[in-house]
Amino acid sequence: MRNTSIILVLLLLMPTLTAVAEGGVNEASSLEGTDIATLQIDTQEARANVAFNISLNLSEEADQNGTIVEWVTQICINSGVCYPPNTQSLERDESGAWIGEIIPDDSVTYINWRFVLHYEDQSEVSIPETGWGWKVWSSCWYDNGTWGGSAWSDLGDDCKPDEDGLPGPTAPLAALSLAMAALMARRD
């Protein structure tokens, strides 16, 4: 009985656990109080197989102290899966700005990122301190049963994958997995 109650509670909570943020809404952390003075993003949406570029400038003090900037990105795709984070050192251009580029794959839903500043004294600071500070949605995204993006409004069904549906976990599969785990735990 206890296991059944736990499963029912988890099933009731599942929609609230998966709906953390609103689909299609870009997010940006504040740069106030950080050593990043400015941040420019070349577009307000990610596009499949198109370079996504950023450029930032450090505060004068951080810039003069030999600070190195890393960009930690994570690409999430329409099946609900996020690839492991990828870290790259940003390069300085001729103007002194730190620049970086990633190319999302065909089924990009959104890109998360944060920065890590490495100071000359071997210390480092993550911006933001925890989690992902920025999120930019794609031109054709799928989130919790909803399609959206500028390509969705232009292309409609051409934005969607074939009728085979999306690979990856769904609510019934997750419920079945939880039930099996509860039964296995009970057996021990």
Image: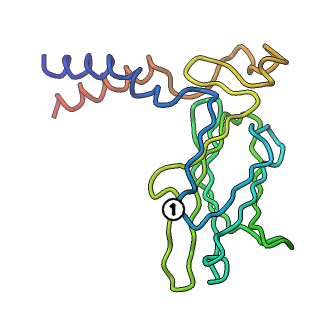
Indicate how the structure is coloured in the image. rainbow
Is 7 situated left or right of 91 in this image?
Answer: left
Which residue is nearer to you in this view: 170 or 140?
140
Looking at the image, which residue is at 71% across and 66% down?
Answer: 57
Crowd tier of the residue under label 1, counting other residues whose Cα lies within 10 Å: few below 14, some 14–19, many 20 or above: few
Where in the figure is residue 50, as x and y percent of width and height? 84, 44
Residue 86: image quadrant is bottom right
Where in the figure is residue 83, as x and y percent of width and height? 60, 46
Looking at the image, which residue is at 82% across and 42% down?
Answer: 49
Which residue is nearer to you in this view: 72 or 64?
64
> Given the image, on which type of amino acid does mark 1 rest?
Gly
Q: Is residue 28 above or below residue 26?
A: below
Is the N terminus in the top left, top right, bottom left or bottom right quadrant?
top left
Residue 185: image quadrant is top left
Looking at the image, which residue is at 79% across and 38% down?
Answer: 48
Counting the numbered discs, the total is: 1
Which residue is nearer to you in this view: 8 or 101?
101
Looking at the image, which residue is at 60% across and 45% down?
Answer: 28
Where in the figure is residue 176, as x and y percent of width and height? 37, 20
Q: Is residue 169 above or below residue 40?
A: above
Which residue was labeled with disc 1?
Answer: 33
Q: Is residue 25 above or below residue 65?
A: above
Is the C terminus in the top left, top right, bottom left or bottom right quadrant?
top left
Q: Is residue 104 above or below residue 117?
A: above
Seen as rendered, the residue at the extreme left is: 1
Q: Secondary structure at mark 1?
A: loop
Where in the figure is residue 74, as x and y percent of width and height? 61, 48
